[in-house]
Amino acid sequence: MRAWRAAFHQEPELSGDEVRTREKVLQALRELGLPTTTFPGSLYGVVGMLGAGTSGPVVALRADMDALPLEEATGLPFRSRRPGVMHACGHDVHMASLLGAALLLSRHPRALGGPVKLLFQPSEEEGTTGGAQPMIDAGCLERPTVAFVVGQHVDPGLPLGTIGWGAGPFMAAADSFRLTVRGRGGHASTPQQGPDAILVASEIVTGLQAIASRVRDPTDPVVVSVGSVHGGTRHNILPETVVLEGTVRTVRPETRDLVEQAFRRRVRAIASSLGARVAITYRRGYPALINPPGATATVVRALEVEFGRKAVVQVDRPLMGAEDFARYLERVPGTFLRLGVGGKVPAASLHSAQFAPDERAMVFGAATLAAAAVALQHGSR
Ligand SMILES: [Zn+2]
Ligand SMILES: [Zn+2]
């Protein structure tokens, strides 16, 4: 697994560009003697198959494949050889762990209670279309029909040797917006001549926080963040337009709809009350990731047997990050887990140039996926 991971890590590829990564996955699966399927065009996913032709529930195990546009600063001996691209979200660890699970299960074929599909999925970091939906559209959950799906993500907040789980809302839906506020440009000494786009944009930035605090039940999390503000050129010129960009995170589908409506209403109301116009682009990204309680309980019990109760940690609050594994869970039951990669020293966060997960976690990652597949197939309770 370490060799596989180092190979992935040294040659990271961005979303939609996972050509070499796919080659490495295919080669590893061939070495394990497993049949593989690829997709046409630029969908660089791979489906590997274990126990093809056996009867029993089909379990799909998923790992994502893409890296991020970051200049690596870990100093690892197998650090990225590609300038400005880095596996900073642990997807290299996810792939190596899934290959480890395939190795484990292929050595113990009698443990299986049916076929296991190995889903290597590109473009998770892309954020809107993602890679899960194109894989589903291309039939990765059919022929044979998948009954359960399991995935995991490294978590530097959990200690090495632990697995985090949660039933119900586990990760957020992530939608993005772009607002173009149009006022009237002119000399900054004569603001009375027309709506000031900077002032209107500022009112919008502040006003949006009332959505997060006043539209929904306070126990139901909502995040509205403006991440970019662009307008103006110098101190004494009022610009004609200001562009705001940001993200909206929710965990309940009803809240997601409610917040979008409130967002549009409030932005228009603020702009029109100040005589300005605003163009709103609101894009839906990945849906919330909701872990079904039944399948989650089956997996958790199996992991407690495998690793001991202390190692299997309930995560009580949803993470407001998003993950396109949610798309599989919209179709079939299963569960998404967190793999502890934290050490004694506080680990660098995901998506940072210093992110260096403790790779011994791959032992747990591989065993977790293998144990989850077997448990779901046998319905052990
Ligand atoms: Zn990421
Ligand atoms: Zn990730």
Image (cartoon, rainbow, N blue to C red):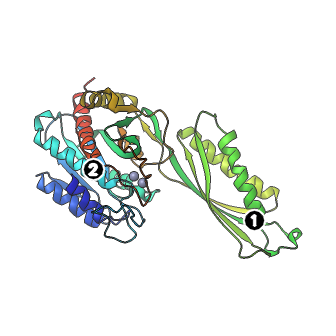
Does ligand 1 reach within 8 Å of label 1's beta carbon?
no
At 34% from the left and 66% from the top, the residue drawn is 17
Disc assigned to residue 70: none
In this rendering, the answer to whether 116 lies above or below 235 is: above
Q: Can I make out residue 151 in this image?
A: yes
**Marks 2 and 1: in contact by CB < 8 Å?**
no
Q: Secondary structure at mark 1?
A: helix
Q: Can I make out residue 282 in this image?
A: no
186 sits left or right of 32 in the view = right
Q: Quadrant of residue 114?
A: top left
126 sits left or right of 31 in the view = right
Which residue is nearer to you in this view: 136 or 291? 291
Q: From mark 1 to mark 2, how far is it between C-alphas?
A: 48 Å
Seen as rendered, the residue at the extreme top is: 381
**Badge 1: residue crowd in 10 Å (few <14, some 14–19, many ≥20):** many
According to the picture, the residue beneath numbered tag 2 turns out to be: 119
| Ligand 1 - quadrant of the structure image | bottom left
Q: Secondary structure at mark 2?
A: strand
137 sits left or right of 31 in the view = right
Q: Position of residue 197 (x, y in %)?
A: 76, 66
The mark lying in front, picked from 1 and 2, is 1
At 27% from the left and 29% from the top, the residue drawn is 302
- Residue type pointed to by label 1: Ile
In this rendering, the answer to whether 268 lies above or below 291 is: below
In this rendering, the answer to whether 263 lies above or below 147 is: below
According to the picture, the residue beneath numbered tag 1 turns out to be: 198
At 77% from the left and 68% from the top, the residue drawn is 183
**Badge 2: residue crowd in 10 Å (few <14, some 14–19, many ≥20):** many
